[in-house]
Image (cartoon, rainbow, N blue to C red):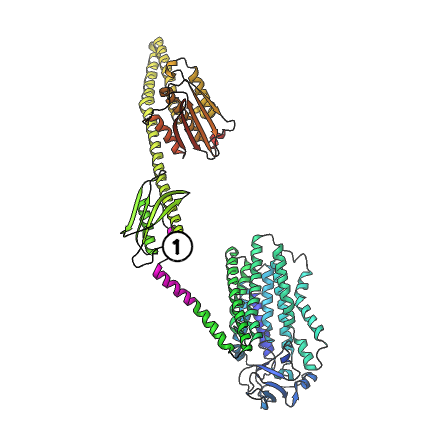
Amino acid sequence: MVTAAWAMPVAWIAVALLSGPSDGTAVSSSSIDEDQRWGTGVRVLRAYGDTPLIEGDTVLRIDGRTVEDWLSDGGSGSWSDGDAPLYEIRRPAAEIDHEIDIEVPLTRYPIGDAILANLSTVSLAPLLLGFASFAFWRRPGSAASRSFLAGAALMSGGLTSWPLGLGAIDLAGARGVWPQLVGEGAFALGLGALLLSAVALGTPPGWLRHRPWVVPAVVALPYGGYLVWVLTVVNRADDQPDRLQDLVTVAVPALAAALPAMLLVLVVTYLRAQDTVDRLALRLLLLAVVGGLAARVLLVDLPAGLGDAALVPWEILGPPLVGAVLCSVVVAMLRFRLEEIEPTVRRALVQALLATLVGSVFVAVAGAVNLASDTSFDAMVAGGVVALLLLPVAVGLQRAVRRLVYGDRAFPGRVVSELRRLDPLTAPEEALEETLRVLARRLQLSYASIEVFGEGGLDQIEASIGEKRGRTTDIDLVAGGATLGRMRLQVAVGRDPFGPGDRRLLADVGSQVGALVQAVAINRELQRSRQRIVSAREEERRRVRRDLHDGLGPSLATLAMGLDSARDLLDEDPAKAAVLLGQLSDQTRAEITEVRRVIDGLRPPALDQLGLVTALRQRADQHNLAGDTTARDGLAWSVEADDDLEPLPAAVEVAAYRIVLEAVANAVRHSEAGSCAVSLRRDGDALRIEVRDSGVGMPADPAPGVGLTSMRERTEELGGTCTVSSAPGGTVVTVRLPLGAPSQESTR
């Protein structure tokens, strides 16, 4: 199909152009422009090869007969290569047009010269075919790509209507008007195929198959525009040339009907589309079509209507504009990276349309001034173009000078962007020094320093570069509402100091450096926390190993030796063997107790069996009911908890269990209290623990013991807080542990 799509227009153009002799001209064919009607003569719009005719000539007679005479006879002239009919023409001159007679030799159609003279227009055909072939190659089964390829081939065949259209001799019977009519008809049919492609692109697969009437209706729509045109002008022309010219004018009415229909189809399908990708594809198509039409109107048609020429000649604007539109069409058909391409095209199109609109307004104003005064229109347009070209140069030069004098003080985004690229995972001193080097280079500083206060768990750090001379500009480093430190900056000698206009820059820099300081501090604390976790894990492993090696290991070895001895005594002295087995049984029970103690050191089994609240209440009951009152010093303790407290994460359960027992143990040993109340409840996303005794309280300057240190370490491991304070009537331990997602074990 791709080969046929390329071969068909090439073969048709060759047949149409070489079917008769040519006088090397291309004359006006469309009757839209009243100045180019055939009734009073045929204007030469293009001249190719060695013809003596030139552009602008008006052919009045050929071999003594007018164009009307020739057409009234049906263009019955018989011409061949080598003939030299006599042309009577009117040639424009500087002062007055004059009529002359010229013999014009007839030759084969100068295809090469015609293509070179209209290269920008002719190149649109292979451009259209190339994009359509690529879309079909990638999506051969798509109705949209097939219709697009067919439309490209048919529209390329329309070159025989323009610019490779009729010559003056064709109206006198050389080739006749059939190449013109067929070319324009093929162009209209190609428009119908493109319209069908738009319909297929905006509808689900198989939609056209279930509605067979849609295809002929859509393809025939451009011919509907032509039919309206014919019915409108059928009674307008009084002579044969004008009537024939009206009848062969097909492409323009078809285009006038097809373009609004295509826009309507795209808008309706876009509004009805549900899938995001489909909406992006249709919106890209709408942007491409509307943008292309707007560029054509604003840059070519509107300036040509107001002045003498287009702002940008179509020969220059056409290929890149059509190429951009076709590229957008193919991207939409293939759904290729629409999330990235569609917004880029939309932004570029908006900027281009704004620039085009401004340029068109300028041209319109220049045209109005030209009509109202003697000022040259060309001079004003040239001055405007030069000003537009020099404007980016002036802006760039201004920025370069400002950067040379002030550094990047006028561009806060650049400074902040480079600060964001700094790595907070390096050593704190190195990170801060690199920050200062960046600021000194970007802001042209002679001195810069950063001081971290060392509050809120942060280390006190100081870093500076350069030498301080005189007064500095101080900036507080704030992050999360807290002031972490202070930065001092001093501009280099000979540079303007910071002023009110630099407030935004200093605020942005302070915020970014504050965030960097916070990140550095958090990273250091994270490293320390990891070290503490590793140390705690290794200490726990060492304890377990010591318990197993020093306690359980030798005991099991002794038990094995005792069992060997009992086996030897079974035959010799059964009574003694029985006594020994009884001793070994007691020893085994003791070892089981030791194993349970080791396991309890890892994670209390009561937490898995009973849960945190019940396990603590069981320990309280055991303590309160114990017979040895001296050991518990007369203290009784109780546990209160919310009903919705559990389940809790496993790590929080263990930490809470250990902390409560340690706090109660401290109360037993030091508080001289008679009672102790433990309260557990949820506080937002944290577990709040409160242990309150009725004892003597804490001393004025307490020394941290093992118990308090253990509670604080367990709390900090989970990112919580632990406070110990004296209240009227005793001591209060308050712990807040953050809650994560409950573990599977804690929810069973």
Q: Nearer the viewer, residue 511 or 719?
A: 511
Above or below, 181 against 430 in this view is below
**Residue at image x 68%, y 86%?**
69
**Residue at image x 64%, y 84%?**
41
Q: Name the kind of residue labelled 1 in the image.
A: Pro
Q: Is residue 209 magenta?
A: no
Q: Which residue corresponds to mark 1?
A: 500
Relative to residue 738, is residue 542 drawn left or right? left
Relative to residue 452, is residue 617 drawn left or right? right
Where residue 39 appears, as percent x and y from the top left, is 66, 83
Residue lying at the far right in this picture: please name it.
235
Above or below, 49 against 285 in this view is below
Q: How many marks?
A: 1
Q: Nearer the viewer, residue 81 or 716?
A: 716
Density class for disc 1 (Cα within 10 Å; few <14, some 14-19, many ≥20) is few
Q: In which image quadrant can residue 615 be found? A: top left
Where residue 418 appears, as percent x and y from the top left, is 38, 53
Quadrant in which the N terminus appears: bottom right
**Residue at image x 44%, y 68%?**
391
Please name the predominant secondary structure of the magenta segment in the image: helix
Residue 427 in sight: no
Where residue 105 appears, as percent x and y from the top left, is 57, 88
Q: Nearer the viewer, residue 30 or 311?
A: 311
Q: In which image quadrant can residue 404 be found? A: bottom left
Magenta segment: 392-419
